[in-house]
Image (tube, rainbow, N blue to C red):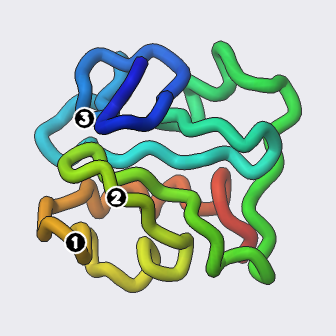
Amino acid sequence: MLCKGHHVAGNVIDNETRCVHYHSRLDIIAIKFYCCDTYFPCFQCHEEVGCGSPEVWPADKFDEKAILCGSCGNELTVNEYRDCDSACPYCKAEFNPGCSLHATLYFEK
């Protein structure tokens, strides 16, 4: 699905990157998976239709764009996302703080 000008793969249900697994008001980010350079709304979408070889973002690449804000369409680096206190630094839309519970599925410690 095209979300704010970017292709987001997986079971996306709207143009703000929500998916069948995570679709609350705050679930508005997609993560570019390091392994396949493709945006997905969540790790479950990647497991279902992704590359089949999940890899997390290495710490030395945290300055690369890897997060898509579903509200405004801006891309954030991993560092920007980790430091933004669950709100887009561009449009101030709130992100789901619960995503941090799955951080190890996306980012190196």
Q: Amino acid at mark 2?
A: Asn
Residue 93: % across, % down: 13, 60
Residue 65: % across, % down: 57, 65
| Left or right, residue 15 beside residue 46 | left
In primary-sequence order, the first of circles 3 and 1 is: 3
| Left or right, residue 93 beside residue 48 | left
In primary-sequence order, the first of circles 1 and 2 is: 2
Q: Which residue is mark 2?
A: 74
For the N terminus, give its image quadrant. top left
In primary-sequence order, the first of circles 2 and 3 is: 3
- In the image, is residue 104 above or below residue 50? below
Q: Which type of secondary structure does the marked residue at label 1 adopt?
A: loop
Do the numbered discs 2 and 3 sit on residues whose CB atoms are within 8 Å? no
Do the numbered discs 1 and 2 sit on residues whose CB atoms are within 8 Å? yes
Q: Quadrant of residue 49?
A: top right
| Left or right, residue 79 beside residue 100 | right
**Which residue reaches farthest right?**
53
Q: Quadrant of residue 99?
A: bottom left
Q: Which residue is mark 3?
A: 16
| Left or right, residue 64 beside residue 5 | right
Q: Amino acid at mark 3?
A: Glu
State the residue at coordinates (65%, 37%): 38
Q: Which type of secondary structure does the marked residue at label 3 adopt?
A: loop
3 vs 1, front mark: 1
2 vs 3, front mark: 2
Do the numbered discs 3 and 1 sit on residues whose CB atoms are within 8 Å? no
